[in-house]
Image (cartoon, rainbow, N blue to C red):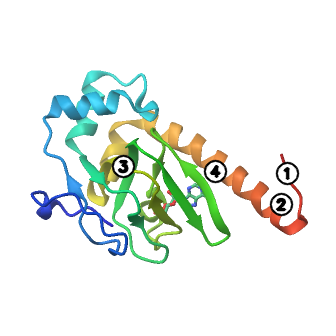
């Protein structure tokens, strides 16, 4: 699933077999309503009204049904996602990894390195997502440098966790 702005008047999509480029329902909300969603996202905590307004301008709120594959491993990716409500499962080449929860993000890797999606992300509940297109992603990072440091911290944690998982697989131990 990659969000398609041209399809914003269609209902939320719910076919778990839809490919990544299929449509997910974009909710038509006022800028203030979108800002209220953003205020609940820990990734944006401490951001002022003006920063949140800029983020809201560069993003869409999209509702996705449980069971939908939001990204598919190996496919091209053009969107960055922040979970506002709901939970997703991350399926990486080494197996099903972490669940991601409200406030967490995914889809940054393909935008950062231009490679295909590294994992399949499946909605395990109905989701409300903040979606930022490739063209706005870099502008978002340029205009909100705090976001870069927050994302780097989270990405470091993900690498550590992945290393521990690989260690456990190789050695048959629980590394915690
Ligand atoms: P991207 O490769 O663009 O699309 C799939 C996304 O899954 C990826 O970006 C990351 O956001 C996320 N992802 C990949 N591997 C992991 C992991 N080990 N833990 C958490 N999230 C991951």
Distance, label 1 to label 2, CA atoms, is 6 Å
Q: Which residue is mark 1?
A: 175
Q: Is residue 27 above or below residue 166?
A: above
- Of the numbered discs 4 and 1, the one sitting upstream in the chain is 4
Q: Of the residues tagged 3 and 2, which is closer to the observer?
A: 3
Q: Quadrant of residue 24?
A: bottom left
Q: Of the residues tagged 1 and 3, which is closer to the observer?
A: 3
**Position of the N terminus by quadrant:** bottom left
Q: Position of residue 142 (x, y in %)?
A: 36, 43
Q: Secondary structure at mark 3?
A: strand
- Of the numbered discs 4 and 3, the one sitting upstream in the chain is 3
Q: Which residue is mark 4?
A: 158
Q: Is residue 93 above or below residue 35?
A: below
**How dense is the environment of label 4, judged by Cα within 10 Å: few (below 14), some, or many (20 and up)?**
few
- Of the numbered discs 4 and 2, the one sitting upstream in the chain is 4
Q: Is ligand 1 within 8 Å of the beta carbon of the residue shown at mark 2?
A: no
Distance, label 1 to label 3, CA atoms, is 32 Å
Q: Quadrant of residue 35?
A: top left
Q: Which residue corresponds to the image point at 44% horizontal and 72% vertical from the top-left?
A: 72
Q: Which residue is mark 3?
A: 127
Q: Secondary structure at mark 2?
A: helix
Report the front residue among 176 and 16: 16
Numbered circle sitting on residue 168: 2
Distance, label 4 to label 2, CA atoms, is 15 Å
Q: Secondary structure at mark 1?
A: loop
Q: Of the residues tagged 4 and 3, which is closer to the observer?
A: 3
**Position of the C terminus by quadrant:** top right
């Amino acid at each position: 699933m990659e969000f398609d702005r041209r399809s914003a008047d269609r209902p939320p999509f719910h076919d778990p077999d839809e490919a990544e480029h299929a449509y997910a329902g974009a909710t038509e909300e006022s800028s203030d309503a979108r800002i209220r969603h953003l205020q609940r996202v820990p990734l944006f905590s401490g951001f002022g009204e003006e920063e949140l307004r800029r983020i809201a301008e560069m993003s869409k709120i999209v509702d996705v049904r449980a069971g939908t594959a939001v990204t598919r491993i190996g496919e091209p990716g053009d969107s960055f996602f922040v979970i506002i409500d709901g939970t997703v499962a991350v399926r990486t080449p080494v197996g099903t990894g972490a669940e991601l929860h409200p406030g967490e993000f995914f889809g940054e890797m393909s935008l950062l390195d231009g490679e295909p999606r590294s994992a399949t992300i499946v909605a395990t509940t109905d989701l409300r997502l903040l979606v930022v297109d490739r063209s706005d992603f870099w502008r978002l990072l340029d205009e909100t440098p705090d976001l870069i440091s927050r994302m780097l911290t989270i990405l470091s944690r993900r690498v550590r966790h992945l290393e521990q998982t690989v260690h456990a697989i190789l050695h048959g131990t629980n590394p915690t």
